Image (cartoon, rainbow, N blue to C red):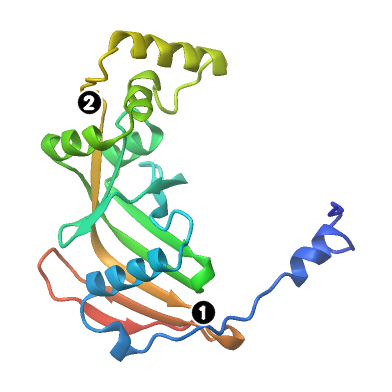
Amino acid sequence: MVEHTNPSGSGLGRSLAELRQEYSQGGLSEEQAGDDPLALFQRWFEEALAAGLPEPNAMVLATAAPDGKPSARMVLLKGFDERGLTFFTSYQSRKARELSANPQAALVFPWHPLERQVRVEGIVELTSAEESDEYFRTRPLGSRLGAWASEQSAVIPDRTYLERLHAEWMARYPDGNIPRPPHWGGYRLVPFVFEFWQGRPNRLHDRIQFSRSRVGAPWQRCRLAP
């Protein structure tokens, strides 16, 4: 059992201070990175899949309100191509409200077992209704019903309330032919920055960054100090 104590003393504080890991699985050279960040992202993503990482498409999505107050949460990547990286959520959620007011966001893929991390920054736009409909049809029945039952980020009285709404929507669509809610759909982050981080010994990590000034502009590659 871990003892909770002052960080300057013994117990949890000292345990946290002593937690460290030496990274030695590999490196990332400019030659390995290449000139196309999307190609490198695809290669790293496929390697995360091959390594059996749990939910390799889980990513931290960071947004900010107009006053600069930030928030972050985990969401799931559901597609990526030359247009950007796509995820789906409720348009009633806190992140949706923040993206509506300030359509800039950042993503982080924390692939710890591979000693890797990918950061992406860019502008967020709505996907088309057709794309949202297409993805919604692939969701399990319970998840499709959940999109109707949950007013995401709203205060609710208890768990029973949520389960009752889910059951009510299930009774409304007994045949399973559930349309996509108008308040639910996709977003696409159009990237302007990719950063690939590979852990290295002595905290001398490899950080290769790609950036561009606008969509269609050539990517510029540089190395960042760790």
Label whose residue precedes the other's in the sequence (2 or 1): 2
Mark 2 nearby-residue class (10 Å; few <14, some 14–19, many ≥20): some
Residue 23: image x %, image y %?
Answer: 58, 81
Amino acid residing under circle 2 = Arg
Question: Which residue, given by chain and number where applicable, does mark 1 sit on?
Answer: 199
Disc on res. 122: none
What residue lies at 24% left-to-right and 44% top-to-bottom? Answer: 187
User: Is residue 7 visible from the viewing direction of this image?
Assistant: no
Q: Is residue 130 left or right of residue 36?
A: left
Picture quadrant where residue 185 is located: top left
What residue lies at 38% left-to-right and 24% top-to-bottom? Answer: 146
What residue lies at 41% left-to-right and 27% top-to-bottom? Answer: 152
| Residue 194 drawn above or below residue 70 | below
Question: Which residue, given by chain and number where applicable, does mark 2 sit on?
Answer: 180
Picture quadrant where residue 202 is located: bottom right
Amino acid residing under circle 1 = Gly
Mark 1 nearby-residue class (10 Å; few <14, some 14–19, many ≥20): many
| Residue 128 drawn above or below residue 143 | below
Residue in the foreground of this view, choosing between 168 and 71: 168
Residue 161: image x %, image y %?
Answer: 51, 12
How many numbered marks, from 0 up?
2
Q: Nearer the viewer, mark 2 or mark 1?
A: 2
Disc 2 element: loop
Q: Is residue 55 left or right of residue 178?
A: right
Q: How far apart are the two marked residues, 2 and 1, measured between alpha carbons? A: 42 Å
Residue 163: image x %, image y %?
Answer: 49, 16
What residue lies at 42% left-to-right and 12% top-to-bottom? Answer: 167
